[in-house]
Image (spheres, grey):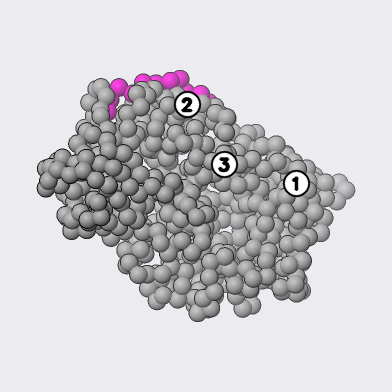
Amino acid sequence: MRALLLCALALAAQAGQPRTFQVRGGAFVLDGAPVQIRSGEMHYPRVSPDQWRPRMRMMKAMGLNALCTYVFWNLHEPAPGRFDFSGGLDLEAYLHTAAEEGLMVLLRPGPYVCAEWEFGGLPAWLLAEPDLQVRTADPRFLAAARRYLEEVGRRVRGLQVTRGGPIVLVQAENEYGSFGKDEAYKAAILGMFRAAFEVPLYTSDGPDAALLAAGAMPGLPPAVNFGAGDDPSGAFEALAAFRPGTPAFCGEYWTGWFDHVGEAHHRVPPGPGAAGVAWMNARGVSYNLYMFHGGTTFGFMNGANWAGRYQPDVSSYDYDALLDEAGRPTAKYFAYREAIRGTLPAGAELPPVPAAPRTRAIPAFPFREAAPLEGLLGTPIAAERPRAQEALGQATGWTLYRHVPAAAARGVLEVKGLKDFALVRQGDRILGTLDRRLGQSCLDVVLEAGRPLDLLVENGGRINFSRELQNERKGLADVLLDGKALRGWDHHPLPMADLAGLRFRRGPVKGPAFHRAAFRLAAPCDTFLDVRGWGKGFVRVNGRNLGRFWDKGPQRALFCPASFLRAGLNEIVVFDLEDRGRRTMAGLPDPPDQP
């Protein structure tokens, strides 16, 4: 174990010098010596860049020697062939920081990542072709994946351990055994990874023989994924039975769990997870704590699950992890740290725990200005039938579908293929809402002639797990009135990225609207913006999208990092689907208790 503690120091001391990392004799071998990987998962887009290093130092202080991260295709290639690795997406800077902190890196480029992330990290523009099948040998998907993996490989080439960098392992695909059995696809993807990366590759699946077999790739060591409270001995027995002689490696040890809209906040007690970590440490088993720090899924990047119904994730990715959403160590952090410390050799010590980041309250401030949604409507895209968001060139956000009835009518309005939430209005009159979560598709309506019928549809986040990935084209498929399809639609894509067209005025606004306020700070601070009393929408601070809110819970506050704020005047804009009369907001040092 002493050698394991010295591993980080050795990495820092030898940065820039080519090294060797191998899978040999049932072990991971660094420079000829067996090494136990004790990794923590943290995703760079979910953490403000100024906090990357402090969070990594928290990893080191509890005895971890490696950082694991996904790479998010949809962020890095927002349009075909146009790549973005700037600012908070600077993957190379993130990995350099890990190297400077003496951490090995496990890199997981996907192309599919799951991660409770919009479409599992796959770019929405793939779905502009209505019959394209993701994660298959569909040549269109393979061509796009190859371009992306080549770009990632080019950017991190010098950051592999073989060239003096921190990357020791790269994961090929992600839990493919839970998705499909397309051997041609796996062969093609494996070829791309071998061409792009020099360090050893591995796969990652559930601890089940069928899942391992479906996800495995020739010559790659498989890892097993399981959670706190599960029996680690059973998981590793399944791994050994499937691939005798492979390193015992838990690719994801789930420290907590994620939250869906309208459900309870997940809490996983520290004890069982800490016991599992102690069990793995005592046997020299390698593992990755998923998540060490979850952070925040900013903007509209939350994913969703499918369990016979649609289950969108909240913006908070607190995950009940070892660090909370603001990066503060929890009781679970200290329990896991003690489990690691208890397996150290005599005389070995862990680094001291750094001071926890501070959060602060912001006094309540009023919203005195509002602007109607109509200010964002530009030239419409006309079509006979409703088009999906992807066909409109839109990845996330809202879309307004508008039809003008030629005659007055009364009947049942049926919306087919709704994904995911619709506010139905005619003029200022709200006809109702439809929620995919609840399986809703029909409304009894009375329509006036010549007045626009509006369906404001929200993309609530594409499903990120299961075969339902193939069916996640957003918006509407068709709209019927008493069984007869309505034809003649105007489409207004509303990605909500540019709000320059809004014209704010003092006083309330009916219907979907943007509400604006300003507040002053002596100095920037981390805080949680209290969204209790608001309805359904999102919050932007100084032009940065903090994420979604919905009064269904369980999330009741949005984390705002200090880096999004500034000394002096700050602007906040809240989009709310309907006026709830809420006119104030405040910053809290902690999120309110969650159900």
- The percent position of residue 121, horizontal first and vertical second, equals 46, 58
N-terminal of the two: label 1 or label 2?
1
Q: Identify the element where label 1 is drawn.
A: helix
Q: What residue type is labelled 3?
A: Asp
Side (left or right) of 531 relative to 128: right
Residue 368 belongs to magenta span? yes
Q: Identify the element where label 3 is drawn.
A: loop
Q: Which amino acid does label 2 sit on?
A: Gly
Residue of label 1 = 272
The region drawn magenta spans 359-370
Badge number at residue 318? 3
**How many marks do you count on the picture?**
3
- Number of other residues with Cα within 10 Å of mark 3, as a class: few under 14, some 14 to 19, many 20 or more: many
Are discs 3 and 1 less than 8 Å apart at CB? no
- The percent position of residue 307, horizontal first and vertical second, equals 52, 54
N-terminal of the two: label 2 or label 3?
3
Are discs 1 and 2 less than 8 Å apart at CB? no
Q: Which amino acid does label 1 sit on?
A: Pro
* Residue occupying the far right of the picture: 346
Which residue is at the front of the view, 454 or 516? 454
Mark 1 or mark 2, which is nearer to you?
1
